[in-house]
Image (spheres, rainbow, N blue to C red):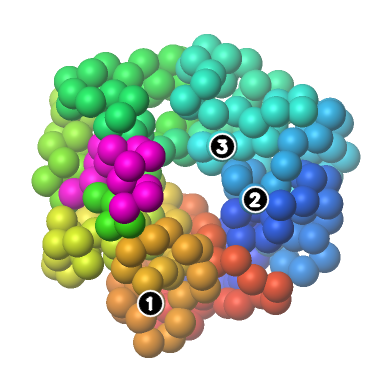
C-alpha cells in the first residue's frame, strides 16, 4: 500500500467534527474545514429526517463509512445494541455504505466469551454476505469507576483477548477482523492489559486495515488530538501507510495534519 501523501487521504469523522449538530450541519462543517474526501459517520452528529437525500446531495464531495452509533436512519441512530445485523444491512445498503465498524458488546450485555463470539459471527456473516465489510474495534478495561459501573467492561479489552478472537475469526475464514483504536490501547497500556510491544506488534500485523487515532489521559476515551510528544504519536510514526483507512478522531476546530507521523 502506498504511503499517504495528502491530508485528503485521511478520513474525517463526525466524532471529531460533529459538535453535537445535526448530520447536515456536521457534514457542512467537515466540507468547509477539511480537505477530506471520505467521512466516517459516527457519534458526534445528530440524526436528520432524510439521511439518504442528504448523503446523495453530497456524493460529489464525499464517500462514506459508518461507525458504531451512526446517525444514518431517518431521525435515529443505527446501533449494534439496538438493531440486528439484517436491519443494519438494509440501512447501509440504502445509503451505499459498504463498511461498518463496530464496538464489541459490553460484558454487562454479553458476559461469556462464547456468546460474544456467536454475536460477532452473526455480524460478520450477515453483513459479509451483503458485501459489507465489518471490523470490530479494540477496546480496554475501564479505569473510570462510573464507566465500569455502567458497562461492566468490554470484550477485546486486552492483547490476549484480542489475539484469541483473531485466531477464532481466522479459523472461520475472516482474515481481517479488527479496527485498531490507539486511544483505547493507550488506556490499556496504563491499565497494563497491553504493553508497548503488544501495540507495536498489533500495528505491524495483518489483522487490521482500519485505524482510529486520538489521545487521552490514560483513563478515559477523551478524543483529543494527538500531541507530538505522546505514545500514540510514537505508535503512528512509520505505521500509518499500513492501513487503508486512517481516521483522526481528535475533536478540534481546525485541521491538523497527521502526515508528520509518516516518517
What is the number of the mark on residue 143?
Answer: none
Q: In which quarter of the image is the C terminus?
A: bottom left
- Report whether residue 27 is seen: no
Q: Give the range drawn in magenta.
A: 145-158
Mark nearer the N terminus (3 vs 2): 2
- Counting residues from the start of the chain, the first of labels 2 and 1 encountered is 2
Residue that mark 1 sits on:
233
Instruction: Say whether marks 2 and 1 touch (CB < 8 Å).
Output: no
Q: Is residue 155 magenta?
A: yes
Residue at 51% over, 37% down: 68
Viewer-proximal residue, 106 or 135?
106
Q: How far apart in space, not on screen, are marks 3 and 1 (Cα)?
A: 26 Å
Query: Quadrant of residue 212 in the image?
Result: bottom left
Q: Is residue 14 above or below residue 87?
A: below
Task: Provide residue 239's location: percent of width, then percent of height.
Answer: 34, 68
Q: Which of marks 3 and 1 is nearer the N terminus?
A: 3
Q: Is residue 79 above or below residue 68?
A: above
Report x, y in % for residue 63: 69, 44
* CB under 8 Å between discs 3 and 2: no
Q: Which type of secondary structure does the marked residue at label 1 adopt?
A: helix
* Disc 3: which residue: 69
Element under label 2? loop
Name the residue carrying label 2. Answer: 44
* Rendering coords of residue 190 (x, y %): 22, 67
Q: Which residue is drawn at 52% across and 12% down?
A: 86
At 73% across and 42% down in the image, what residue appears? Answer: 46
Amino acid at each position: 500500500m502506498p504511503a499517504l501523501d495528502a491530508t485528503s487521504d485521511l478520513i474525517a469523522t463526525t466524532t471529531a467534527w460533529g459538535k453535537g449538530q445535526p448530520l447536515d450541519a456536521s457534514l457542512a462543517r467537515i466540507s468547509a474545514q477539511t480537505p477530506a474526501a471520505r467521512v466516517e459517520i459516527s457519534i458526534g452528529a445528530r440524526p436528520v429526517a432524510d439521511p439518504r437525500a442528504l448523503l446523495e446531495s453530497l456524493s460529489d464531495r464525499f464517500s462514506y463509512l459508518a461507525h458504531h452509533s451512526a446517525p444514518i436512519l431517518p431521525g435515529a441512530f443505527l446501533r449494534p445494541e439496538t438493531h440486528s445485523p439484517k436491519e443494519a444491512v438494509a440501512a447501509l445498503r440504502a445509503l451505499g455504505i459498504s463498511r461498518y465498524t463496530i464496538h464489541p458488546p459490553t460484558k454487562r450485555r454479553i458476559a461469556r466469551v462464547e456468546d460474544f463470539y456467536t454475536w460477532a459471527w452473526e455480524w460478520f456473516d450477515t453483513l459479509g454476505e451483503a458485501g459489507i465489510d465489518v471490523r470490530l474495534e479494540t477496546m480496554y478495561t475501564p479505569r473510570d469507576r462510573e464507566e465500569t459501573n455502567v458497562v461492566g467492561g468490554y470484550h477485546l479489552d486486552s492483547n490476549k483477548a484480542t489475539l484469541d478472537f483473531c485466531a477464532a475469526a481466522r479459523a472461520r475464514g475472516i482474515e481481517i477482523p479488527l479496527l485498531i483504536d490507539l486511544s483505547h490501547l493507550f488506556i490499556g497500556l496504563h491499565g497494563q492489559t497491553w504493553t508497548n510491544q503488544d501495540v507495536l506488534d498489533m500495528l505491524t500485523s495483518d489483522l487490521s486495515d482500519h485505524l482510529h487515532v486520538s489521545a487521552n489521559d490514560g483513563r478515559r476515551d477523551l478524543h483529543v488530538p494527538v500531541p507530538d510528544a505522546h505514545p500514540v504519536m510514537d505508535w503512528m510514526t512509520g505505521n500509518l501507510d499500513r492501513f487503508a483507512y486512517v481516521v483522526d478522531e481528535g475533536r478540534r476546530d481546525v485541521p491538523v495534519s497527521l502526515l508528520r507521523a509518516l516518517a
